Image: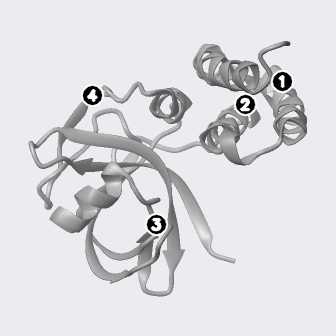
């Protein structure tokens, strides 16, 4: 089973604007692997530039914000590759694509780190931060899941949120729950 780093990936659009998205970076024996879904801006940008930045943050609002369409987080220029990183990330890894495996759903990009930098200490995720990240993943897959699964997962994740959340975690949770509510109402407009 691969080790997956829950992270925020930054790439550059053709016009130089940053694209910011949550994505797991898989650790493999060859380095790091990114597997964006088809179609996606991250996929297009990786194909065009062959580079990306993997950002590590404990601000779960960025994970939630990207899922709801809020992608205007502050960035700064990277050190080695032509790109950007999150301005307030705890650490980042700049990568170059070394090999690509084609796939109809999720092509795999095997990457080599060309620069890593730590900006602030990481003290681990508390249960609320974990819950928000898991809810963000759930929200990104709402159309693939039955209502019962969605409700059961949210009920379980809410336990950790209630026990350890701060203001940032509650804000991120609320953003994501608005998406869940809208999805469930669209699926069953009579409730």
Name the quadrant containing residue 171. Answer: top right
Give the camera-side residue of 103 and 26: 103
Instruction: Tell me the number on the disc at residue 52.
Output: none
Q: Residue at x 11, y 55 (%)?
A: 82
Contact check, label 1 and label 4, Cβ < 8 Å: no
Residue 69 visible, this orientation: yes
Q: CA distance from mark 3 to mark 4?
A: 24 Å
**First in sequence: mark 3 or mark 4?**
3
Per the image, label 3 sits on a secondary structure element best described as: loop
Q: Residue at x 83, y 13 (%)?
A: 190
Is 19 drawn above or below residue 66 in the view shown?
Answer: below
Instruction: Tell me the number on the disc at residue 74.
Output: 4
Q: CA distance from mark 3 to mark 1?
A: 33 Å
Count of residue discs: 4
Q: CA distance from mark 1 to mark 4?
A: 30 Å
Per the image, label 4 sits on a secondary structure element best described as: loop
Q: Residue 147 at x, y = what percent?
A: 84, 35
Give the camera-side residue of 63 and 49: 49
User: Which residue, given by chain and number where applicable, does mark 3 sit on?
Assistant: 35
User: Which residue, given by chain and number where applicable, does mark 2 sit on?
Assistant: 128
* Mark 2, other Cα within 10 Å: few <14 / some 14–19 / many ≥20: many
Q: CA distance from mark 1 to mark 2?
A: 7 Å
User: Which residue, given by chain and number where applicable, does mark 1 sit on?
Assistant: 163
**First in sequence: mark 1 or mark 4?**
4
Task: Tell me the mark number nearer the camera, choosing from 3 and 4.
Answer: 3
């Amino acid at each position: 089973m691969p080790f997956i780093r829950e992270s925020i990936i930054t790439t550059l659009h053709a016009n130089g604007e940053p694209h910011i998205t949550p994505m797991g970076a898989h650790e493999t024996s060859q380095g790091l692997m990114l597997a964006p879904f088809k179609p996606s801006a991250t996929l297009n940008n990786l194909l065009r530039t062959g580079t990306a930045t993997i950002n590590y943050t404990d601000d779960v609002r960025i994970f939630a914000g990207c899922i709801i369409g809020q992608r205007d987080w502050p960035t700064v220029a990277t050190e080695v590759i032509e790109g950007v990183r999150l301005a307030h990330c705890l650490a980042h890894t700049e990568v170059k694509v070394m090999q690509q495996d084609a796939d109809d759903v999720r092509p795999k990009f095997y990457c080599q780190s060309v620069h890593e930098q730590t900006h602030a200490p990481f003290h681990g995720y508390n249960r609320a931060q974990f819950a928000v990240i898991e809810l963000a993943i759930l929200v990104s897959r709402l159309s693939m899941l039955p209502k019962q699964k969605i409700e059961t997962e949210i009920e379980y994740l809410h336990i950790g949120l209630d026990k350890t959340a701060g203001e940032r975690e509650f804000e991120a949770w609320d953003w994501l729950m608005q998406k869940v509510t809208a999805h469930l109402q669209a699926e069953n407009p009579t409730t």
